[in-house]
Every structure is written in C-alpha cells, then in structure tokens.
C-alpha cells in the first residue's frame, strides 16, 4: 500500500475522485495527508470528513517559494508519503520540494499538453478554436506544466461549448484519468526515460 499525499487549493473534486477510487480498491494505496494553501479549500473538508489528516499552511508569512516549500516538506516527510499528488494546487513548486520527491510528484492539467499550459488551459483552448482538448496527468519538473506525460485523455470541443461546459466535460475525464495514473504509480508500472514516461505492462 503506497502512502499518498494530496496538495489542493480549491474544490477538491479530483481529490474526491481519488478518495472514491481508493474506497473502491481501484488504487493500491491510501491518502494519508491533504495539504492546502487555502484555509477554506473544500478539499480539506472532504479529507476531514473521512478522518484523513488535513492541514492548512498559510503561505503569506513566507517571502520565498522555497521557504514555503520547506514548510510543506515537514508534514509531507512526517506522513511518510511516497507520492505527492497535486490536485488543483495553485502554486509552482520549487526545487526544494521536487528534489525531495524526484519523479514522485504528479499534476493534472485541463488541456492536452504541451498545448495550453498555465492557469487558463480551458479558456485558451476554447478561444483558440481547437476541435479537441482534454486533460493530461504528468510528473512535475521545474517548469510550468512541462514534466513527462503519464496519461492523456482527449475531450471533443463542441460547437456550442462555453468555458463552463467544456470544463465540466474535461473534469469528468480528469476524474477517470487521475486515479488510473495513480494506480499505475502504486503498482510500480511507470518508468521515466528522459522526457518519456513508459508504462510497463504484465
Ligand atoms: C482541475 O481542473 C485541474 O485540471 C486543475 O485544477 C482543477 C482542480 O479542480 N489543475 P478540483 O479542485 O480538483 O475540483
């Protein structure tokens, strides 16, 4: 059973999908800690409801990203987690955290990377006029949504789409994709070779 920590800033619908997948035994691991940089993040409440340790760490007293990440590192290491899952965590991580968990931090992005990185992936895909967008689970490196891709799922962009409609369908895909990627990690099936993340089968 792998020990998983989740970092989330917002609603936590991906966290919820992960927790439900754990409950259905679709993930060979368990979430041992949820951390947030927002006190009111619904993600914290979702964790507490299930008796999972949920901590808010206020970023405001920390001048630099690295100092905040050092503060995050303490509960992460104490939790003895092997995998750190970013689920709508709205901060870039510094090398302090990434070096402590090499190829062990995952993120989900609401577009088919490398298209539309950053915080407005859904809006930018719609504005660009692409016919297909989707979501990407990737390992996190020092860049903005640039690490090796683990899994992707395509979502068609429909004629009458609004940002809300498209985001809703992409999120439904995220809730399928993230638990699958986490399970591949838990089963030790992911091998990073340069930019590529290979999936071992059988
Ligand atoms: C997701 O759409 C994810 O792609 C992005 O942030 C959003 C988080 O949503 N990184 P939620 O908090 O999991 O509901």
Image (spheres, grey):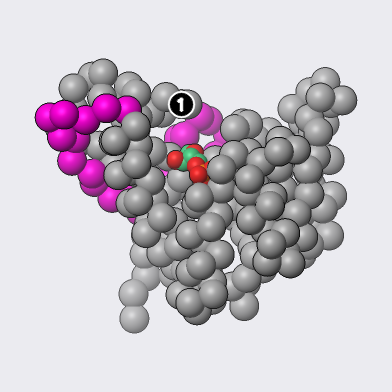
Which residue is outermost to the right?
Answer: 61
Q: Is residue 128 magenta?
A: no
Which residue is outermost to the left?
Answer: 159
Image-quadrant location for residue 40: top right
- What residue do we see at 35% from left, 51% from top? 172
Horizontal side of residue 192 vs 49, given as left or right? left
Horizontal side of residue 140 vs 59, given as left or right? left
**Quadrant of image for the N terminus:** bottom right
- What residue do we see at 26% from left, 18% from top? 127
Residue 30 picture location, percent across and down = 62, 70
Residue at numbered disc 1: 118
In the depicted structure, whether residue 98 falls above or below residue 121: below
Question: Is any atom of residue 15 visible in this view?
Answer: yes
Disc 1 element: loop
Residue 41 picture location, percent across and down = 66, 41
Residue 24 picture location, percent across and down = 48, 77
**Which of 85 and 162 lies nearest the eye of the viewer?**
162
What's the magenta region? 141-163
Disc 1 packing (10 Å; few <14; some 14–19; many ≥20): some
- What residue do we see at 34% from left, 23% from top? 123
In the depicted structure, whether residue 86 falls above or below residue 26: above
- What residue do we see at 81% from left, 33% from top? 58
Look at the magenta stretch and give its main secondary structure: loop
Q: Is residue 154 magenta?
A: yes
């Amino acid at each position: 059973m792998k020990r998983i920590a989740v970092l989330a800033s917002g609603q936590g619908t991906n966290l919820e999908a992960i927790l439900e997948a754990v409950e259905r035994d679709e993930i060979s691991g368990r979430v041992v800690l949820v951390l947030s940089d927002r006190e009111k993040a619904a993600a914290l409440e979702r964790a507490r409801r299930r008796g999972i340790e949920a901590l808010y760490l206020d970023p405001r007293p920390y001048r630099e990203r690295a100092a905040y990440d050092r503060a995050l590192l303490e509960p992460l290491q104490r939790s003895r987690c092997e995998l750190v899952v970013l689920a709508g965590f709205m901060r870039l991580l510094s090398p302090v955290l990434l070096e402590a968990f090499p190829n062990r931090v995952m993120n989900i992005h609401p577009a088919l990377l490398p298209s539309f990185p950053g915080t407005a992936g859904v809006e930018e895909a719609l504005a660009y006029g692409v016919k297909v967008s989707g979501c990407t689970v990737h390992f996190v490196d020092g860049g903005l949504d640039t690490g090796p891709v683990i899994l992707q799922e395509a979502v068609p962009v429909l004629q009458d789409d609004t940002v809300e409609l498209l985001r809703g369908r992409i999120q439904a895909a995220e809730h399928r994709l993230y638990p699958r990627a986490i399970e591949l990690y838990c089963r030790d099936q992911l091998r990073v070779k340069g930019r590529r993340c290979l999936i071992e089968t059988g």
